[in-house]
Amino acid sequence: MPPDTNLYELEFSDYQKRRGQFWDRVNSSSSHSRGGCYQKRLAHVYQNIVPSGSKVLELGCRGGELLHALEPSFGVGIDFSEQALVKARKRYPHLQFICADAHELNLGDQTFDYIIVSDLVNDLWDVQTVLDSVRPFCHPQTRLVFNFFSHVWNLPLRAARALGLATPNLPQNWLTKHDMNNLLEIAQYETLRQWREIIAPLNIPFVSNFCNRYLAKIWPFELLAITNFIVARPVGMQLIKKPTVSVVIAARNESGHIAELIARVPEMGGGTQIVFVEGNSTDDTYDVIASEIAKHPERNCMLLKQTGKGKGNAVRNGFDAATGDILMILDADITVPPEDLERCYSIMASGLGEFVNGVRLVYPMQDEAMRFLNLLGNKFFSWAFSWLIGQPIRDTLCGTKVLWKADYRRIADNRKYFGDFDPFGDFDLLFGAARLNLKIVEVPIRYRARRYGETNISRWSHGWLLLKMVAFAARRIKFI
């Protein structure tokens, strides 16, 4: 064994010994919890990231308070301080606590939906080794969530610890967001979101809540925040080989497009189902769909009658009845070429993305494909939504959206969080995808002018409704 390897192992062993002794001493002597306001705010932020009922692994769990607050269906806490875990096991017997070093994990073949690393990376000997050690416990949809102190708070935290206002600590790494993103990429993870939290770590009535809920999300005040958050996912893990597809087409007064739709929707993956949802048409759309389906027994088609009003309701009817692994929305007016769905399928099947959103604002549009005021409105809502969710979205109202059926079920289960008043279904899905921290990928498409019938969009009334939806979502996503 090379001499430098022995030196590395000796240094690592010394690190483990010093850290273990230090934290055992801290946890055995602490009669009260320091930083209670800070920890309470952290728990609130994590509760809005991790849905209750998830399978959660927390590294550096200390006394288990955060893990307990997340209400996991199966929760495992890892810490190398036995003193901390004695208290955790007594308080939370429904959770599992293991005394181990995060650098050397052995949890069998268990996988988790969320892996939490709270205020730990700056205290680790080798962050990349820890990232490598947790990968066997990830599945393709696992999310890793980190928070770690900002460099801005280095000196204030030292002062707070010296005064006994914060939990003491040994010298730390003080990693930046750039450092963490680089380490995640090296270890085959992809950053999905990153943001700052908590300006006021002490409890000052009214002031702390205002600073932490609002100012911490607005530039330049966010630069004063104490902790950085990053949500990441593992890459290179395939979910399903050759998944099946269901293409949902909401059709209202679209009889002139039906035959062309059946002819042009491509066959994809393990098989393609076309689900037509007819929505209270005043023409013969329903009869035309039934007739065209009968003419093409080689296509796997289904016809439904919409149960309510609005495109959003029609899409939900179609999604509920669809049998494919991947769900796609295609507008019946063929302003988006059906052939472009194959590009969306490739992104989903390869794992490059978990939610595909079409973009009509890249390539030149045909004349009159989108009115000028509609274009301005779309750009405004795109900017607002990108700011809200922390992922760039250039075209919120493009009808082409693609996601896994399993993820749609999770979105539907959490729909009450945002309310049920989106007549289009676009924001409903995008807000839901953002809350689940899905990887959103945008696919440029060439937008065509409608050749038959008239648009069902009301520019002013629907625009006002969308403004109200953005304001509502800001309270549910951004200013939590």
Image (cartoon, helix red, strand yellow):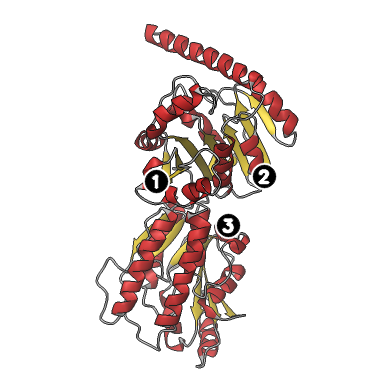
Q: Residue furthest top?
A: 3
Closer to us: 185 or 446 = 185
Task: Tell me where residue 193 appears, x and y as whole percent.
Answer: 43, 47
Q: Is residue 249 above or below residue 381?
A: below
For mark 1, does the 10 Å Cα neighbourhood hold few (<14), some (14 to 19), or many (20 or more) residues? some
Give the number of the disc on residue 406: 3
Q: Nearer the viewer, mark 3 or mark 2?
A: 2
- Place residue 457 in its image quadrant: bottom left
Spatial separation of the CA atoms under disc 1 and disc 2? 29 Å
Location of mark 2 (residue): 71
Q: Nearer the viewer, mark 3 or mark 1?
A: 1
Q: Residue at x 51, y 65 (%)?
A: 472
Task: Tell me where residue 94 appears, x and y as whole percent.
Answer: 74, 37
Closer to us: 173 or 140 = 173
* Amino acid identity at mark 3: Ala
Location of mark 1 (residue): 222
Is residue 36 in sight in this rendering? Answer: yes
Task: Tell me where residue 172 appears, x and y as whole percent.
Answer: 44, 23
- Side (left or right) of 378 relative to 135: left
For mark 2, does the 10 Å Cα neighbourhood hold few (<14), some (14 to 19), or many (20 or more) residues? some
The kind of secondary structure element at disc 3 is helix
Total labels: the figure holds 3
* Amino acid identity at mark 1: Glu
* Amino acid identity at mark 2: Glu
The kind of secondary structure element at disc 1 is helix
Q: Are marks 3 and 1 in contact (CB under 8 Å)?
A: no
Q: Residue at x 52, y 89 (%)?
A: 281
Badge 1 or badge 2: first in the primary sequence: 2
Give the number of the disc on residue 292: none
Q: Residue at x 38, y 6 (%)?
A: 3
Is residue 403 in sight in this rendering? Answer: no
